[in-house]
Image: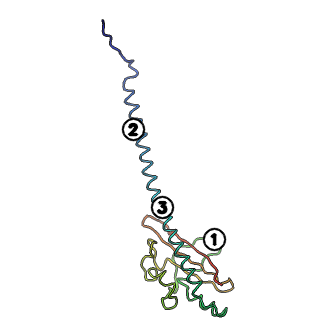
């Protein structure tokens, strides 16, 4: 019996090594894609959490304003409603544009709005609003427009995380009658 040696054709030498390297490259790209998706998912979840908290806070503010105003007459209702204004300048735009989150004017006072103040307490004191990163009193607004617009209340809450270039905002418009 004669032992025969099997020889491979020279064109196939090292082909398995190339296949293995391509498979490793494809696997590595897949892992990198999963890592990138994980970071995006965490960022999106945080954004959704902040938007939910801003919505809840704005709704609580609007609810407290609605139950706290004096409704004995139209004049007292308008006068009572205006005491809830916080950083009312500039007025919210009516053309759909988005102004920067830099508001000025008289800040909400605990004596004039004792039921609203706890909700904006940290913002009114210049520290962070609970759950809204980077939010301060200058970045929150309660705009009261009681002159012929059915006592419109516009609540704007702004925040910015360390990785955000621009302010994020939540605006709630309601009418108090």
Query: Is 47 above or below relative to 113?
Result: above
Residue extending furthest top? 1
Q: Nearer the viewer, residue 72 or 20?
A: 72
Q: Give the residue at x 49% y 64%.
A: 47
Looking at the image, do the residues carrying marks 3 and 1 touch, with CB atoms under 8 Å apart?
no
Q: Quadrant of the C terminus?
A: bottom right
Q: Give the residue at x 33% y 10%.
A: 4
Query: Is 2 above or below relative to 97?
Result: above
Q: State the CA–CA distance, disc 2 to disc 3.
A: 32 Å
What residue is pinned by disc 1? Answer: 96
Residue 112: image location, x then y, percent: 52, 91
What secondary structure is marked by label 3?
helix
Looking at the image, do the residues carrying marks 1 and 2 touch, with CB atoms under 8 Å apart?
no
Disc nearer the start of the sequence (3/1):
3
What secondary structure is marked by label 1?
loop
Residue extending furthest right? 148
Q: Residues within 10 Å of mark 2 (few under 14, many from 20)?
A: few
Residue 174: image location, x then y, percent: 62, 78
Q: State the CA–CA distance, disc 3 to disc 1.
A: 27 Å
What residue is pinned by disc 2? Answer: 24
Q: Quadrant of the N terminus?
A: top left
Q: Nearer the viewer, residue 151 or 87?
A: 151
In this view, the mark in front (2 or 3): 3
What residue is pinned by disc 3? Answer: 45
Q: Nearer the viewer, residue 158 or 117?
A: 117
Residue 68: image location, x then y, percent: 57, 87
């Amino acid at each position: 019996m004669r032992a025969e040696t099997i020889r491979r054709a020279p064109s196939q030498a090292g082909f398995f090594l190339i296949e293995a390297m391509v498979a490793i490259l494809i696997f590595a790209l897949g892992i990198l894609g999963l890592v990138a998706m994980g970071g995006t998912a965490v960022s999106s979840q945080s954004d959704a959490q902040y938007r939910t908290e801003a919505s809840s806070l704005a709704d609580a503010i609007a609810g407290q304003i609605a139950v706290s105003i004096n409704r004995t007459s139209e004049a007292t209702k308008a006068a009572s409603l205006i005491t809830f204004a916080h950083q009312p300048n500039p007025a919210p735009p009516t053309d759909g544009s988005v102004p920067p989150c830099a508001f000025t004017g008289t800040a909400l006072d605990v004596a004039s709005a004792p039921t609203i103040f706890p909700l904006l307490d940290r913002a009114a004191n210049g520290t962070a609003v609970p759950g809204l990163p980077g939010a301060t009193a200058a970045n929150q607004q309660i705009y009261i427009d009681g002159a012929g617009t059915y006592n419109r209340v516009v609540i704007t809450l702004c925040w910015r995380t360390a990785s955000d270039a621009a302010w994020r905002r939540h605006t709630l418009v309601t009418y108090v009658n």
